[in-house]
Amino acid sequence: MKWNTKGSILFQHSCGSLVIMHSIGFFVNTARITKMKAILITLACIIGLCQAKITYENCLKKGNEAIAELRHFEVSPDPPSFSKNVTVTLDAELFKDMPENLMIKMNIYKVTGIFSIPIPAPCLMGVGSCTTPYCTFLEKYKEQACPFFPEGASCDCDIKAAKYGGNKITIVPPNLGPIIKFVASGNFRIELRFVDKSTKKEHLCYIFKGKALP
């Protein structure tokens, strides 16, 4: 009876140790999983899957003369929708009159997957990843561009050196068509360049990254 009692006590102690060890293992594993989730979320944000807002950066190569500068660009709501009006705040300056032979080169990418693979949007009927004479580009997107011209300035191809922009201006999005909307919706990357048609030199380059809704 004494042995049985002692055995029972030992058995109870053993079970208690097993429970404690199991509990410790559970919390250790949970902590590891939580830590792993935090690492994955951080990595996702670093590569752009958690893009908080639309960002932009100057990508003009050293040695190229900048014809303009974008000092501030903000869109609301963020993410914007290609099907709804947006509010834009813009501050930019054109340092010299726009040259007649300037081309606007735009590359639009849909960024997908954990490795942020860029899928280029096609150029369809002058919309998408296209290279267009700046005057043709202005005529096509006049409704969106003209509100940012200086007061009293004519919104035409004779674009003069001046400051351009505005505060919280409501803009109607252009009709991009279903294919471009699909490609550009979600996480996107847009490369905007001003290129001299004759010399092929770039005089402006900005990369925009963010998220957009169809």
Image (spheres, rainbow, N blue to C red):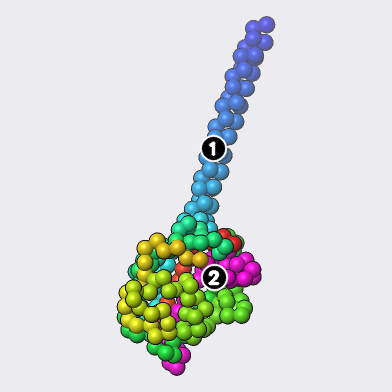
User: How far is the residue under mark 2 from the one under mark 1?
Assistant: 54 Å
Q: Between disc 2 and disc 1, whose residue precedes?
A: 1
Q: Is residue 145 visible to us here? A: yes
Q: Which residue is mark 2?
A: 174
Q: Is residue 70 visible to us here? A: no
Q: Are marks 2 and 1 in contact (CB under 8 Å)?
A: no
Q: Residues within 10 Å of mark 2 (few under 14, many from 20)?
A: some
How far from the left and from the top, in percent, is residue 170? 45, 63
Residue 170 on the magenta segment = no
Residue 188 on the magenta segment = yes
Q: Residues within 10 Å of mark 1 (few under 14, many from 20)?
A: few
- Tell me which segment is drawn in magenta: 173-201
Query: Which residue corresponds to the image point at 39% horizontal and 64% vertical from the top-left?
Result: 89
Question: Which kind of residue does numbered mark 2 sit on?
Answer: Pro
Quarter of the image where the N terminus is located? top right
How far from the left and from the top, in percent, is residue 37? 54, 47
- Report the number of numbered marks: 2
Q: Which residue is mark 1?
A: 28
Pick out the residue farthest to the top. Answer: 1
How far from the left and from the top, in percent, is residue 189? 51, 68
Identify which residue, 154 or 127, lies in the foreground: 154
Query: Which residue corresponds to the image point at 56% horizontal and 43% vertical from the top-left?
Result: 33
Q: Is 116 positioned to the left or the right of 90 in the image?
A: right
Quarter of the image where the C terminus is located? bottom right
Q: Vertical placement of 106 versus 185: above or below?
A: below
Q: Vertical placement of 117 versus 66: above or below?
A: above
